[in-house]
Each structure stands twice: as structure tokens, then as C-alpha cells.
Amino acid sequence: MPYFLSTLTFFLLLGVVVVVHELGHLIIARMNGVFCEAFSFGFGNVLFKKKDRKGTEWRISLYPLGGYVKMLGDADVSSVREVMPEGYTEEDMERMSVHRKKPWQKLLIAAGGPFANFVFAILVLFTLSTINGVPEYNNTITVMSEQNLAYKSGLRTGDVITKANDTEVNNFIDIAKQVKISAGKALKLELKRDGETKEFNIEMFGRTDDGIKPIQSLGISPKGFKYKKVSILQSAKLAILTTWHLAYSNIEAVCKIATGAMSTKNVGGIISIFKVSSDSAEAGIVSFITMIAMISIILGAINLLPIPVLDGGSIAIAAIEWVIGKPLNKKFVNVIFTVGLVAVVGLMLLGMWNDLVSIKFFSWMESLIK
């Protein structure tokens, strides 16, 4: 795909999921009596603006990387302290400021963004499966990276796996089940490649000073599928279950990375998102729309983590204040938000580092110098 189109699909994917997220905050905030001063599509210099009947200024800004909602009382779009804007009275702030609301209301407002991401994804997946049916993946695999266990063990894109642990497999779900139960043990695979039958014994564990560390992922994905028609009820059920499982698995993965149970090499960054947006768009409109729904689920799930700066941190603080019946010390809140910001920035930098390593950026730089 041409670079211009790849960039366009990247901005579209990221823009949709972030705008949906921020709209969730805005809708719940309005329902709880908070005045939303502005809602921006994008960041930076404002190119166009118009106020609606409720006084919210809707903006289109220069850089189309998502957007933000500005609520009354915020010093900025990620503020944790109240600032009284010029022209507002104490009475206005008491009535319409996000920071003057009750803890349960602040909890709902913080949860509005992730909730919107999940609802959006469910509606998209439900619509696609109702119209097209659900994808039924075959047993042909794609090896996702040369850095992962699958490639290092000899598996290649296009391999057709016929048996796993001496059990016949007919689709990718069968393969995934056998991979999961083999964590910490050996995985025996039989496959077809260029008409030949090959066998592999893959150790689904790593040896460390502390003993054996289970590996739960091979690093493969399905290569082909066909659509299977389902009922409306099945479509709804599958959309909800898919959203739940993807959200849960991403939260679980972050927790495992934080505790050392999973390698930090699994963390991806902005380059990874750019690549999946481009690849999915190249595969067709249905694939691209599905990917938007997937990224929306991931964004919603990650934001539920109880890390200050993320929505989950705001939810946790609101919940604590609700239980103890009084606000937490502002200096303490500012300190933990600073710690949370450092953690999130560190995670982003780690993702960027992994992306650069995966595309062999440093080898390319070295070759230029030589």
C-alpha cells in the first residue's frame, strides 16, 4: 500500500477509536451536569470551531491524532486539579465543575470512555457478523515475526497444521487450544509444507536461573478464513464474547508483563499500530473496520488499568473517595499521577523500542553509517 494511504488509514483508525472514547466521557459528563467547554477532533491549532446549544465548542484541530474533551474546572485535558476559568463564579463551579461532583459521578465519567469503546466495538462486530457472517479460520498459519518462538522453531507462513499433540486440527481455534494447554511443556506439531509432511517438537518454556518459565504464545495467526452465516442472536452473543475475551486477554497480558510472567518484547508501539492499520486496510474494508473495533477494545481495556493518568486510575481514586467519604489529599493525588505518567510514558517508549528492533531500524542505521 502507498505510504500516503497507509498514513491516512493510520490516522483514521486512531482518530475513530480516540474520538469514540472521548465522546463517551462527554456524554456521561453531560448526563451528570458537568459543563463541557470544548470537544476537539485532533490536537494543536484550531482550524474550525462552532458552539452547540449547550455551549460546547466543537473544534477541528490541525493534528488528526484522536481528540479530547475539555470539562469545566480542568486546568488542561489531563488535569487532576480544579482551576476556576475567568468569568465563572463559585456557584457556577459548584454546579457544573467535574471536580465538584460526587465520587460516584466522577467514577461514572471516568468509566464513560472505556465503556464507549466497548459498546462501539460490540455494535461494529454485531453489524459485520449480521451482514457477512462470522469468519471461520482454517488451519493455515501466518508467522507474525522473525523474533517470536514460531519462527525460531522452524514454522513458516503458509504452513498447514494438521495435528497438534497427536490430535487432528481443522481450524485455528483447535490449534490455539493445543498451544494454550502446552504452556510449560512440549508442543508436538505435524504440518504440510509444499506437499511434504513435517514434524516439530517445540518447547513451550524458557529456562531461567529460577527454573522453567512457561511460554503461552507461539506468535502465529490464521492466514485464511471463510464467512459462516449466523443468526442475529448468535451475532450479538459473539460480539459481546469477542469484546470480553479481547479486553480480558489484554489486561491479563499487561499484568503478566508487569510481574515478569511475560516478556516485555510483547509490548508494541505506534509503529505496530501503523503496520496493522495498513495491513488490515490492504486486506479489505471489512478487515479494516474489524481492526478499528479490535483497537477500540484494546484502548478501552488498557484505560481500565488502575494506573493514575489512565481512566482506571481516576476510577480507583473516585472509588476510594466514595468509600472513605472524603477527597484524597491533593498533593498525594498529584504525586501518584506523576508516577503514573512516568509509567505510561515508559511503556510507550518500550513499545517504540520494540517496534524499532522488530523492523531492524538499528541495523539499517548502522549500514548507512558504514
Image (cartoon, rainbow, N blue to C red):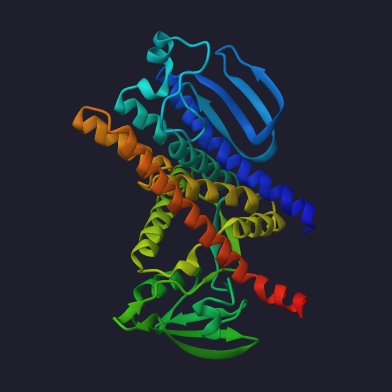
Q: Residue at x 71, y 77 (%)?
A: 366
Q: Compared to 26, does 234 lie above or below?
A: below
Residue 360 appears anywhere in the view: no
Q: Compared to 316, does 51 lie above or below?
A: above
Q: Nearer the viewer, residue 263 or 286?
A: 263
Residue 362 appears anywhere in the view: yes
Q: Quadrant of residue 131?
A: top right
Q: Residue at x 25, y 36 (%)?
A: 320
Q: Answer with left or right where residue 357 lies relative to residue 98.
A: right
The quarter of the image holding the N terminus is bottom right
Q: Residue at x 55, y 13 (%)?
A: 54
Q: Quadrant of residue 273?
A: bottom right
Q: Compared to 77, does 132 lie above or below?
A: below
Residue 126 picture location, percent across and down: 52, 43
The quarter of the image holding the C terminus is bottom right
Q: Answer with left or right where residue 285 lies relative to residue 125.
A: right
**In the displayed image of the protein, which residue is found farthest to the left?**
324
Residue 64 picture location, percent across and down: 68, 40
Residue 329 picture location, percent across and down: 28, 33
